[in-house]
Amino acid sequence: MEAPWIAELRALLGPRGIIDDPTQLFPYEADGIVLLRRRPELVLLPRTTEQVSRALKILHRERVPVVARGAGTGLSGGATPVEGGVVVSLARMRDVLELDAVDRTARVQAGLVNIDLSLASSKHQLFYAPDPSSQQACTLGGNIAENSGGPHCFRYGNTTQHVLGLVIVLEDGTVLDLSEPRVDPLGYDLVGLFVGSEGMFGIATELVLKLLPKPATTETMLAIFESLDAACDATSDLIRARHEPSAIEILDKLTIQAVEASVYAAGYPKTAEAVLLLDIEGSEVEVANTVAGIEPLVRARGAIEVRTAKTDLERKQLWAGRKGAFGAMGRIAPDLYVADVCVPRTKLRELVAHTTRIAREKNLKLATVFHAGDGNLHPNIAYDRRDADEVRRVLEAGDEIMHLCIEAGGSLSGEHGVGLEKMKAMEWLFTREDLATMCRVREAWDPDRRMNPGKLIPIRACLEMKQAVVRPGSNESTGDAEDAGNAENVRSITNAGSER
Amino acid sequence: MSSSLTRFAPELDARVVGRLRPHPRSAELPLVAPRTRDELVECLRAAHRDGLALVPCGRGSKLAWTQPPERADFVLSVRELSGFTAHEPDDGTISVLAGTTLADLRAKARVGGHWCTPDLPQPTRATIGGALALGRSGSDRTRYAPLRNHVLGMSVVLADGTVAKSGGKLVKNVTGYDLHRLYTGSHGTLAVIVEAALRLFPAPESEAWFEREFASFTDALAAARAVADLPVRWLALSLVRARGRWRACGRLAGKHAVVEHEVGLVRATLGEPTARDGAAAERADALRDAAPSTQTSFARIACRPSRVAEVVRMLDLEHTVADATIEPTIASLEFALAGDARALAAHRELLAKRGASLHLVAPDSDAVPFDAPGPELALMHRLKQRLDPQGVFARGRFVGGL
């Protein structure tokens, strides 16, 4: 017989708003980290903020842990469910509620797919700037949870710089309407604090986002190099020379070959050791001036050819290659470790050389594609999850890369978040006091720590899981040490073809 | 609220450098100014241990912008904690101690070929710690958006003396919660900001300053909107009211060729630039330093850009204010207060209905400076409770009694 609280949720959301059939729960067991699977008790698919609020009130009463989920494209295990918990999927909340072309804002539901906002804004000559490579699939709510980036965040900044207001449902069902776009916050900056909190503060159901006017001119450049080091050095030179393109991306040889053999073939030269892909946006004069400044710099670093896209189609192809790179790597090996680390832009060459050395020493196949202008590296290691020894070497390589980044003044993530994947590494970067302060702030939002428990903050740091909530009548913990250990064992293992 | 030095523990007494009012309507209190981060930690630990309450500040120039504290025992200044802990011109980042003046910060950035936001009035008297605590963006917000967007990381001392950091020194980083967004604009009610890492921007090669007088506010606003819609990256764009006249003022800055091109686009609406390069910067600085916010009593209204004209009409600002600066693209209206602040405060409800907020700085009036937040106030109090349960950072100064 169905538990009364489940029946209550079913009555609230209707038959299409709740999933409890084990065969249908399967897709919700993991996000982009597919080896880390946990079966939720239920998946809820609300349509409105009101339904989310009423559902969370019931789950609060029953003390059930909750994990919010957008499209499940995340690469840090941020949407990995909790055993016996409930997943709240925002997939059916995908309406554009208001598009204000005068004030250049959009009010949308959190489940709207990223690219759909730019498509909706396009007729007003506006666009939404953050453009994760998964923007054809990822949701804006997920972008908010992870403070997602994308190639063009070099110029426009990560998601947090584009969020003007939010409607947030707290763990007890309270609706916080912070949606009036304010010049400055009234009191503490709750919106700014919420962005990037990885689903641990509540569920954002409606978002007010900033739209930008489309640039008058866009030039896409492709500089071809005979060495990856030279491409890295050219990037550092561009930053040093104060050039301001919109995007600076690097793809290495293995990535180029994978892309060119795939449906994303962009016309990158297969024999090149690396390509530097740049977008330059602005007025015609501004673009011409920037291009004229960049070309001699990249040539001085040994670029053997510099191309510019002649047509809009050519430009789109060059970018389709970049954005499809992770999918294309499925050709190299069945599985892909997608690292996401950041370093100062003066250290690009050094860190790329280190990752190449580590992969060589561990006999691993490394493909590198990254947001070079932001110092955001994605060393990607192809592997086969059925080979236990290879899995071990991949994980060791990941740890070494993170350690080296920290030593170089870098950090653990530029856009994928910490989630389960990098939770252990938080102790390498932050002190116990730093992490305890994060815990204190988290408890102000979610005193019982039921929202996305067991993520981001290591257990030892602030006894995060010591008081794990147990649902009445159940022996299942909402995220105990065993769960966390499980997370550690499968950290960083993702399937090819998925990138935030 | 009075206090004598003898009440304090030796680690605090040794750091007393004078007396200062935590608010113009409060009595003078001992001014404690630690010289190092360790001394600051000692001061906080002593206050926490002895149940004292304090008001943090930089150089104290904006203490009147809040309400008087409910109870305070001393003022804690970070003015002695100044200088730079890191500067990476080739990476475009700088790490600065909170007591550093904005003038020193700008000068340091300029040496590395950079511009550092915020461009705020009286930079030799204002500290970066104070600007961050107030969450105050500068005249360059038109191009660079709010200051809070460019804080890469922060180190703070909490109420119990715990040193905690968030973020880092990287232009891109999503590791851990963005606690620096919480501290920025918290008016010193949650922590003392010790150090911040900031993103830098390319210093301009060339500048052009436009200043044109209009017969009415409506004409000036129409001109500003027209030039705001051009493919031009304004560094600053404002409508300025002085001596009974409205002017549209704009500042272009960037590479030579780009500024020349932009001047050509703007000329049709605002005429020829009235100053170039060094003279343009001087004129911009002079106007910035005469902003209404440098006066004892002023008001700031913020709304949606499309509602600027409506708010001006509603409050009859076109005719009633003597000095005003309106940034039309940001939708920020600042004006000097001539009459009773309570009369303006009475419009709060009407403004709120139009999504506009009002910040009143009127130290001689008992008008409440801030709008009351809604249901989010409970969450703000919970944040205060978690980070400063004892009220070491004096209560009552910020919104809703925080």
Image (spheres, rainbow, N blue to C red):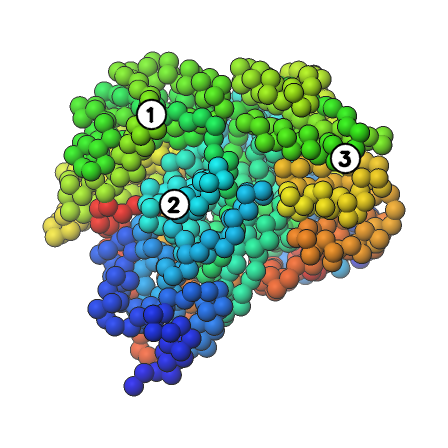
Residue placed under numbered mark 1 in the picture: A311
In the rendered structure, the answer to whether residue B66 lies left or right of residue A16 reads right
**Residue A174 on image: x %, y %:** 53, 68
Q: Are marks 2 and 3 in contact (CB under 8 Å)?
A: no
**Residue B275 on image: x %, y %:** 70, 16
Chain of the residue displaying label 1: A
Identity of the residue furthest to the left in this view: A387
> What residue sits 53% from the left and 18% below the top?
B258
Query: Residue B80: in sight, yes or no?
Result: no
**Relative to residue B401, is residue B269 depicted above or below?**
above
Task: Assign a secondary structure to mark 2.
Answer: helix
**Residue B364 on image: x %, y %:** 86, 49
Q: Quadrant of residue A292?
A: top left
Query: Residue A336: in sight, yes or no?
Result: yes
Give the amino acid at mark 1: Thr
**Relative to residue B374, is residue A142 depicted above or below?**
above
Residue placed under numbered mark 3 in the picture: B217
Task: Assign a secondary structure to mark 3.
Answer: helix
Crowding at mark 3 (Cα within 10 Å: few <14, some 14-19, many 20+): many
Question: Distance between the Cα atoms at labels 1 and 2?
Answer: 22 Å
Q: Are marks 1 and 3 in contact (CB under 8 Å)?
A: no
Question: Distance between the Cα atoms at labels 2 and 3?
Answer: 40 Å
**Residue A235 on image: x %, y %:** 37, 25
Give the amino acid at mark 2: Ile
Q: Are marks 1 and 2 on the same chain?
A: yes
**In front: B115, or A313?**
A313
Give the amino acid at mark 3: Phe
> What residue sits 74% from the left and 56% below the top?
B350
Q: Earlier in the sequence, mark 1 or mark 2?
A: 2
Residue placed under numbered mark 2 in the picture: A115
Identity of the residue furthest to the front in this view: A123
Which numbered tag is attached to residue B359?
none
